[in-house]
Image (cartoon, helix red, strand yellow):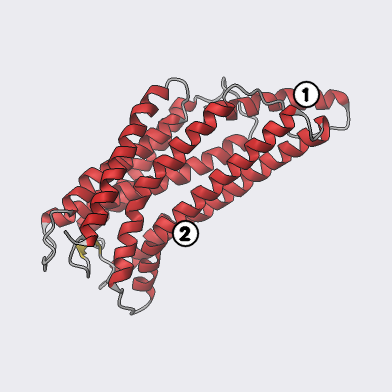
Amino acid sequence: MDGVKFTLITIISVAIFTNSVSLYFLFKKQKKNNYVILCINLSLSDLLQSIAGYIPALFIDAKLQKATMLCKLSAFFIAFPSFTTIAMLTSMALSRMVLLSTCFHCNQINYKILFRKIGFISWIYGFIWAVFPLFGFSSYTLEGTHSRCSIDFSPKTIADKVYLIMIVAFGFLIPVMSILISCIYTAKVMRSKYKFFYVTYGKENVETKRYKEKEKKAFSSFVLMVTSFIICWSPYATIGCLSAFTLTRIPKWLLHSAAFLGKLSAVVNPFIYYWKDGLFKKRFTSTTWNASYFISKSQQNIEDNQKNSRGALRNYMNVFCG
């Protein structure tokens, strides 16, 4: 067995195991936390990609000279969940920012319906982008490695180039910018809450220390989220840009790197969005946060703000932190 297939088998095995285990526990938690609905969709997407996309690729003849139906279907079931996952990750980041930036209340928002809609739209989004090549808008073709099929990164028509430009924009650049902005904004809001605790209760107060720890954990999760997304999808974005805007011949090492790193996203997602976050949830589930969005000049305004903030932050913690 060559190194490429061995690496692929390893990635497939770990991805199927981690996502299957995640799904088992996520389904058990969904009644307690509606946000888990998005994590379930994310794990389902990665599991579908691993089973329907990666496994068939193992049976593609290494000496293949022309894309077969199996090869094209394998490419479709890799692209479809990939675009869905990207949409899901972007939605998860934006939902954190939007819900944290507003004074939301449980009796005003039905989170279960909201997150189900986000999941449904993400699947439709992924399917639309993945189905275009099957109908002549670009195509799924044999890669230069002759070991798998993927989107045609050697555009021959204007439509092919337009498709590549669009998937680079909507499948990488816009999601990266959205995730970065969301994470920076959310970190800024959490920092302001910590400053409130520090000024109001003092540095040694137990609530101040807990919130400082919460801020550090959230920041590390955000960094991990952005870094993993960029590492996993940058090679494909690079290939798309080189193919669309230059006459550069894509080297085989870049094709292999893009394929393996893209597949690794199915492995790292469970650790970032469930397993790591799950430990985080258990630790902070029982904590009651008493924060305020603004420090008013009058004592009455301070009390009013604290009351509103407690409801908003409590809902945020319930939704995103178990």
Whether residue 144 is visible, yes or no, is: yes
**Where residue 154 sits: x, y (%)?**
27, 71
| Mark 2 to mark 1 CA distance (whole Å) | 41 Å
Camera sees residue 321: no
Percent x, y of residue 98? 58, 39
Q: Residue 78 at what x, y percent from top left?
A: 27, 51
Work out whether residue 313 or residue 276 is closer to the camera in this orientation and state it: 276
Q: Is residue 46 left or right of residue 86?
A: left
Callout 2: SS: helix
Most foreground residue, 322 or 73: 322
Q: Residue at label 1? A: 304
* The image quarter in which residue 256 lies: bottom left
Residue visible at 30% across and 74% down?
A: 251
Q: Which mark is residue 206?
A: none
Quadrant for the N terminus, please: bottom left
Residue named by callout 2: 173
**Local crowd size for mark 2, using a 10 Å CA cut-off: few (<14), some (14–19), many (≥20):** some
